[in-house]
Amino acid sequence: MPTPSPASPDHADEGHRRATETGHGAGQHTARPPAPDTTPESTRPERGFLGHPRGLLPLSGLEIWERFSFLGMQAILVLYFADTVRAGGLGMASGTAASVVAAYGTLVYLVSVAGGWLADRILGSYRAVLFGGVLIACGHYSMAVPTATMTWVGLGLIIVGTGLLKPNVSAMVGKLYATDDERRDAGFALYYMGINIGAFLGPVVSGWLGQTQGWHWGFSAAAIGMTLGLVQYVLGRRHLAGRKHAAEFALPPAALRRAIWLILAGVVVLFAAAALLVAAGWLTMARTVDLTSLVSVVAPVAYFLVMFRSPRVSREERGRLRPYIVLFAASVVFNLVLFQAYSTMTLLAADHANTEILGWNFPSTWYNSVLGVAEVLVAPVVAALWQRLGRRQPHASVKVGLGVVLGGLSFLVMAWATTGRAGDGWTMAAWWLIASYVLLGTGDVVLQTTGMSATTKLAPAAFSSQTMALWMLSLALANGIQAQSVKLYAQLSAPAYFGVNGAVTVVAGLAVVAAVPWMRRTMAPVH
């Protein structure tokens, strides 16, 4: 193990300890606390985990269990909403259930903006992720209680917890590498492989329990998974950057106190206003969905304006934000398709997919696991390819455009598979759904790993976690638009619905590829 750099927290803590023990600096007003560790691990030649920094392992492990819990629960959430009250569900119409699930996803990613800000200015990334994980676990335990009230309480806790965890754990991965480290994209691909191990296992376990034993058994499995993720995250904390200090760009004490009071007051006012509107009969489920969609549009626009106008952002950093808008828009279009894997495609599979192999029946939610399997298998191949190509690998915008095209093709496959079908009794062969999920999963690996890596490279220094939160806002906007568009699922024929979605997505991906020359110039020196 090489000697820690002078800026590392271990080195600084040791120097401070020696000074204190020898009487130099002890009780002196000139003594200063250890300097925060802002040196990327890659400046120290550490290759402890598959040729990557050791910190990649606990972060990937946390994401395995977070995605296990989140996507395991989401695999059955729309079915739970749409199931009859007699059977233990909430009795929603299928279109309403899909819309509410999309609104829930919108709120998850909207809150990530606050999560990124809290990490940058108050908590620090390590503690933000830890507190977020605790809230997520509490949310899943709440949903395990078989009452409608605890379902909404649990979803609220998961929304807040995921908003704290998601942008900051991804930002922590970026901090393991220097900006020009060629291992960065490959590292994000390995990290994303961990995410999708959880994406595979969650629907298998929670889906089976939910559809065969009861919905709240599936929610219980999600709770246990998140608890395991927290345990291994804490055990691996010594390899993580930022664990020994608070926010890298912390607010001054007076501003910090004001911010805390404003946050508390804002939460109280928000809950009080919501309670009054519900009591008055104005804040219905439909209006909540519409309001969420509106906020999902306003939030990213406002946040881009804040970053472009901030005095903390240099002229060079501002220039790199312009091509980032294109990557952001590409993510929105792709995720309009991706998130429907857990709404319209889940409903389609439950109603029309073949769920029998050699006389053995399996839950339709297991089709959701195909997406995770595809991504687990594709991610190491993509990581190895990018690492082998090194500086000869395609530009980030080419990768993103390709990912969007693959997402569109996945829905065109579904349009073809459902053409000529009529009535309620028809059944779709398994291979159609598998082919669609494989295309979608491959596109997701290529786009998301590249997008997250580009985000950490293009982010202004003063907005490192918040820029990853901005990437999460692309997911919020996709969910916000989807909350409205999925209402058409029950009104249009399946070929028309999937065909239009797929065609628009393919065209958007080709547009990104066409913009590559401009993207290459404006993103320099980022590749």
Image (cartoon, rainbow, N blue to C red):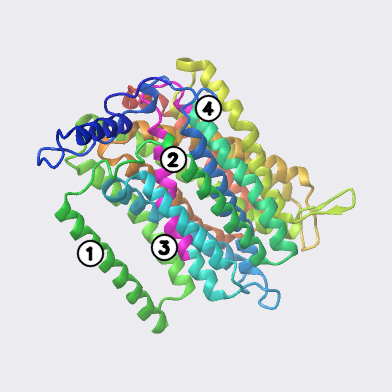
Q: Is residue 318 above or below residue 504?
A: above
Q: Nearer the viewer, residue 72 or 98?
A: 72
Residue 483 seen: no
- Please give the range of residues in magenta: 156-185
Q: CA distance from mark 3 to mark 4?
A: 41 Å
Of labels 4 and 1, the one closer to you: 4
Q: Is residue 348 above or below residue 19?
A: below
Of labels 3 and 4, the one closer to you: 4
Contact between marks 3 and 1 (CB within 8 A): the answer is no
Q: Check disc 2 and give the amino acid type.
A: Arg
Q: Check disc 3 and give the amino acid type.
A: Thr
Q: CA distance from mark 2 to mark 1?
A: 30 Å
The quarter of the picture where the C terminus appears is top left
Element type where label 3 sits in the image: helix
Residue 273 seen: yes
Mark toward the start of the polypeptide (2 vs 1) = 2
Element type where label 2 sits in the image: helix
Residue at the far bottom in the pictured view: 280
Q: Residues within 10 Å of mark 1 (few under 14, many from 20)?
A: few
Residue under label 3, please give it.
Answer: 292
Residue under label 2, please give it.
Answer: 237
Q: Is residue 166 magenta?
A: yes
Contact between marks 2 and 3 (CB within 8 A): the answer is no
Q: Residue at x 46, y 33 (%)?
A: 55
Q: CA distance from mark 4 to mark 1?
A: 42 Å
